[in-house]
C-alpha cells in the first residue's frame, strides 16, 4: 500500500535516529540514510554488501538546496538542474563540507539529485536534510522497482520500507559529471542523452569505461542469478530453443518484433514495444525469469537511442563477466 502521512513521519524519525529507510523514487527504490551521519551512511554499505569506496547519491527535496551541499556550481549544472529536476538526472559536483567522505567513497566530488516521486519528496520535506541513497538491492544484483523487491532482497537489514508503488522510469538516473570542464555522461539512465544535448546545445560523450568510480560501469552489475546471454535480435528464438534442447532452463526476453510467435523455452517475457515500458519493466522481467528457475536468459540489445541507451547499458552489465 502507498505510504501514508504517518508512514512518512515515522520514516523521517528513523532517518533522524540514524536508521535506514527504503524509499520509492521514479527510477528505482533507494536505500536511504541521513547524508550527514557517517555512521548511518556506513550502515548502507553493510546492508548492501557494497565496497565502501563506491560513492552514493545525495537526494535533496528542492533544487534550491543545491548550494548547501556542493561547492562551485557551474552555470551548466544550474541549467541542467532547472530543466530536469525533479527528475532522473544526477549531477556530479565538487563536494560541500557537510557531505561526509563516507557518502562519496572518499572522493572530493559528490553526486546530487532531486527525485520526482511524491513519496520521496514528502520524506525529504519532512526530514529536511539530504538523504544519501544507492539502489536498495544487494551489491551487483538487479535494482528493486517495487517495495516487495526491497523486502525480499534486504529483509531486516532495512529499518523501514516506504511503499510508493512500482517505479515509473524503472532504470537508474543518468549521471552527468559537471565537476570539471566539459560535462560528460558517466552512466546513461532515465534522462536521455538526446534531451540533455538539446538543453546543452552540444553533443555529449558517453564513455565506454569511466575513470571515475561508478559501480554501475563495472562488469556484472545489475545482474540476475541466471546467466544473461546477448544475441542478435533476429537470432533470439533460434539460439534460445537450441540451448533449451541442450538441457538448459532457458528464459527469454523476447523482442516485440516476434509478436506472439511460439517459443520452446522454459520461461518467456514478451517485451513491450515502447522503450519507456521496456525500461519500466526491465528489472522486474529479469527477477521474474529468475523466480521461474531459468539458468540462462537470452536477450538482445535494443537500438541505443533514447531510453534504449540505458536499457542496453544495463543488459551489457547483466551479461558481464561474473566474479569467480
Ligand atoms: P547506485 O544507484 O546503487 O548505482 O549508486 C549511485 C551511483 O552514483 C553509483 O553508480 C555511483 O558510483 C554514482 N556516483 C555517486 N557519486 C559519484 C561521484 N562523485 N562520481 C561519480 N559517480 C558517482
Ligand atoms: Mg545500484
Image (spheres, rainbow, N blue to C red):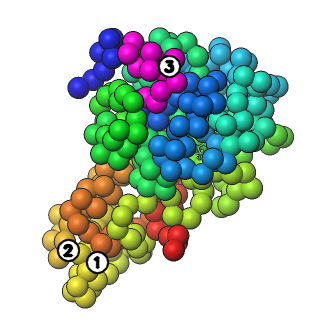
- Residue that carries the numbered disc 3 in the rendered image: 17
Residue at the (63%, 47%) spot, across then down:
52
**Residue 121 percent coordinates (x, y):** 46, 19
Bin the neighbour count of mark 1 within 10 Å (Cα to Cα): few under 14, some 14-19, many 20 and up. Answer: many
Q: Is 141 displayed left or right of 205 in the figure?
A: left
Magenta stretch: helix, strand or loop mostly: helix
Residue 210 falls in image quadrant:
bottom right
Number of numbered discs overlaid on the protein picture: 3
Q: Considering the numbered disc 2 on the image, is that residue within a helix, a strand or a loop?
A: loop
The answer to whether one can see residue 248 in this image is: yes
Front residue of this view, candidates 58 and 174:
58
Residue at the (64%, 24%) spot, across then down:
36
The answer to whether one can see residue 312 in this image is: no
Disc with the residue nearer the chain's start (1 vs 3): 3
Look at the image and give the residue range highlighted in magenta.
8-21
Disc with the residue nearer the chain's start (3 vs 2): 3
In the image, is residue 107 part of the stretch drawn in magenta?
no
* Residue 306 vertical placement versus 207 (above, below): above
In the image, is residue 17 part of the stretch drawn in magenta?
yes
- Residue that carries the numbered disc 1 in the rendered image: 240
- Kindly check if marks 2 and 1 are in contact, taking CB atoms under 8 A apart as contact: yes
Front residue of this view, candidates 37 and 80:
37
* Residue 108 vertical placement versus 80 (above, below): below
Residue at the (72%, 51%) spot, across then down:
212
- How far is the residue under mark 2 from the one under mark 1? 7 Å
- How far is the residue under mark 1 from the one under mark 3? 50 Å
Amino acid at each position: 500500500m502507498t505510504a501514508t502521512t504517518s508512514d512518512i513521519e515515522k520514516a523521517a524519525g528513523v532517518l533522524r535516529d540514524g536508521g535506514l529507510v527504503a524509499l520509492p523514487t521514479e527510477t528505482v527504490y533507494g536505500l536511504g540514510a541521513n547524508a550527514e551521519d557517517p555512521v548511518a551512511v556506513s550502515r548502507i554499505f553493510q546492508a548492501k554488501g557494497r565496497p565502501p569506496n563506491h560513492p552514493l547519491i545525495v537526494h535533496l527535496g528542492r533544487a534550491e538546496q543545491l548550494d548547501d551541499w556542493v561547492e562551485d556550481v557551474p552555470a551548466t549544472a544550474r541549467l541542467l538542474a532547472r530543466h530536469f529536476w525533479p527528475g532522473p538526472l544526477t549531477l556530479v559536483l565538487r563536494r560541500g563540507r557537510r557531505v561526509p567522505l563516507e557518502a562519496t567513497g572518499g572522493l572530493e566530488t559528490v553526486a546530487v539529485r532531486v527525485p520526482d516521486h511524491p513519496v520521496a519528496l514528502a520524506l525529504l520535506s519532512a526530514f529536511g536534510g539530504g538523504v544519501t541513497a544507492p539502489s536498495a538491492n544487494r551489491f551487483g544484483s538487479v535494482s528493486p522497482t517495487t517495495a516487495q523487491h526491497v523486502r525480499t532482497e534486504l529483509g531486516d537489514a532495512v529499518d523501514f520500507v516506504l511503499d510508493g508503488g512500482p517505479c515509473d522510469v524503472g532504470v537508474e538516473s543518468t549521471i552527468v559529471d559537471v565537476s570539471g570542464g566539459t560535462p560528460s555522461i558517466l552512466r546513461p539512465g532515465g534522462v536521455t542523452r538526446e534531451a540533455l544535448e538539446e538543453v546543452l546545445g552540444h553533443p555529449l560523450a558517453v564513455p565506454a569505461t569511466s575513470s571515475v568510480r561508478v559501480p554501475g560501469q563495472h562488469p556484472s552489475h545489475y545482474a540476475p542469478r541466471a546467466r544473461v546471454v546477448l544475441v542478435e535480435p533476429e537470432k533470439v528464438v533460434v539460439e534460445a530453443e537450441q540451448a533449451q534442447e541442450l538441457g538448459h532452463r532457458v528464459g527469454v526476453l523476447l523482442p516485440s518484433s516476434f509478436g506472439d510467435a511460439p517459443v520452446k523455452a522454459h520461461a518467456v517475457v514478451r517485451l513491450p514495444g515502447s522503450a519507456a515500458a521496456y525500461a519500466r519493466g526491465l528489472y522486474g522481467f529479469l527477477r521474474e525469469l529468475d523466480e521461474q528457475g531459468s539458468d540462462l536468459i537470452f536477450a538482445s540489445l535494443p537500438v541505443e537511442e533514447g531510453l534504449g541507451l540505458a536499457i542496453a547499458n544495463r543488459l551489457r552489465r547483466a551479461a558481464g563477466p561474473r566474479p569467480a
